[in-house]
Amino acid sequence: MKLNPVFDDLNNPLEQPEVWSNHLDQLEQKRKKAEQNKGLFKVMTANEWLELAKTSPIPEMLFGEFWHEGEICILFSDSNLGKSILAVQIADSISKGQQIPGFKMEAPKQKVLYFDFELSPKQFEVRYSVKNEVLKVFENHYQFDKYNLIRVEISPEAEPPTETTFENYLNQSLEQSIIETGAKILIIDNITYLKNETERSKDALPLMKYLKALKSKYGLSILALAHTPKRDLSRPITQNDLGGSKMLYNFIDSCFAIGQSNTDKNLRYIKQIKARNTAMIYDTENVIVCQIDKPYNFLAFEFIDFGAEREHLKQVTEKDRESIIEQAKELSEKGYSQRNISKELGISLGAVNKYLKM
């Protein structure tokens, strides 16, 4: 019997002990691997998992404590609060290896793949240039990194093959872009373009499985942007404000949100919602307060201070409360379910139930 071509001419193990030893080690490794792979699962002892973890580097910060290497992270907020502005700012920071003032960054300069499903090229230009009011043109454009920041949008000429859906074709094209660019940092603006419905858990599950598979296959760090359903601005931001919250929230590694300050419409605050690689530092008692400004040719978040979230929440008056009660009753008379009233008014189901009994 021939064990291996290497051993064809070996009649006595003692003639080349090192070769035999290496071969036996290989056989043992194969045996262990076969034992570990149990169909869908990889099974090892806790100590073996720790040994495996030792071979991986410690995840470094990409955007302060909010997003680390190797994480799937979600940034969410209501519409028009600056998600895309902050996301491009983060992409620019990583691509140049320069931290955003007020936010730590440990990771080295590297390539970023930014999927922009929100802005047209002209809308993008408006944010990163200076308008000449006399000539009616944009000039003095901001200089992004020449090689490391790659912006991707859907080609208007592209037509999906007849044998596949648009969603599948989009996902295939996304993976192809990852392979061709070799980028390890992925920013997706907005996550709903990968899956039409993310507010329902059953629709969010395939999407999160897909993103996790991409992350593992290519060693990615993923930041996905998401909109929130209408919410009560008098209440702190929580995981429940993330559409499809249970499924999305359970599958991601980290999550943060942007809120609008009720004290000044130009102010925003950034709050940690979930973290696995660090402690929850920027919670409701310690949010980061910023303003959106464009001093020259780059629209960006500017760090101002730290504060408590309650300082920025809307104060509900008795008049506001009476108005909400009236709206809830009107919607109920129109045939809205309590769940739909809750979504429409941005209040809890419990509040709807209470108001309809009044």
Image (cartoon, rainbow, N blue to C red):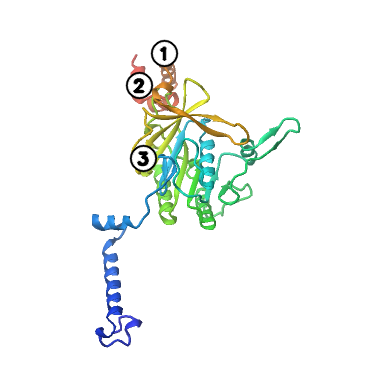
Disc 3 to disc 2, C-alpha distance: 30 Å
Disc 3 to disc 1, C-alpha distance: 34 Å
Q: Where is residue 357 in the image (x, y as percent from the top left)?
A: 33, 16
Mark 3 and mark 2 lie on one chain; the one further toward the N terminus is 3
**Residue in the foreground of this view, choosing between 257 and 343:** 257
Contact check, label 3 and label 1, Cβ < 8 Å: no
Disc 2 to disc 1, C-alpha distance: 16 Å
Q: Where is residue 32 in the image (x, y as percent from the top left)?
A: 26, 66
Between circles 2 and 1, the one closer to the viewer is 1
Q: Which amino acid does label 3 sit on?
A: Ala
Q: What residue type is labelled 1?
A: Thr
Tell me the residue that label 2 is attached to. 351
Examine the rendered structure and indicate whether residue 289 appears above or below residue 100.
above
Examine the rendered structure and indicate whether residue 54 appears above or below residue 245.
below
Quarter of the image for residue 246 reads top left
Instruction: Look at 44% across and 51% down and name the residue there.
Output: 220
The label on residue 317 is 1
**Is residue 193 in view from this perspective?**
no
The label on residue 275 is 3
Mark 2 and mark 1 lie on one chain; the one further toward the N terminus is 1
Mark 3 and mark 1 lie on one chain; the one further toward the N terminus is 3
Q: Which amino acid does label 2 sit on?
A: Ala
Q: How crowded is mark 1: few (under 14 residues within 10 Å), some or many (20 or more)?
A: few
Q: Residues within 10 Å of mark 3 (few under 14, many from 20)?
A: many
Q: Position of residue 180 (x, y in %)?
A: 54, 57
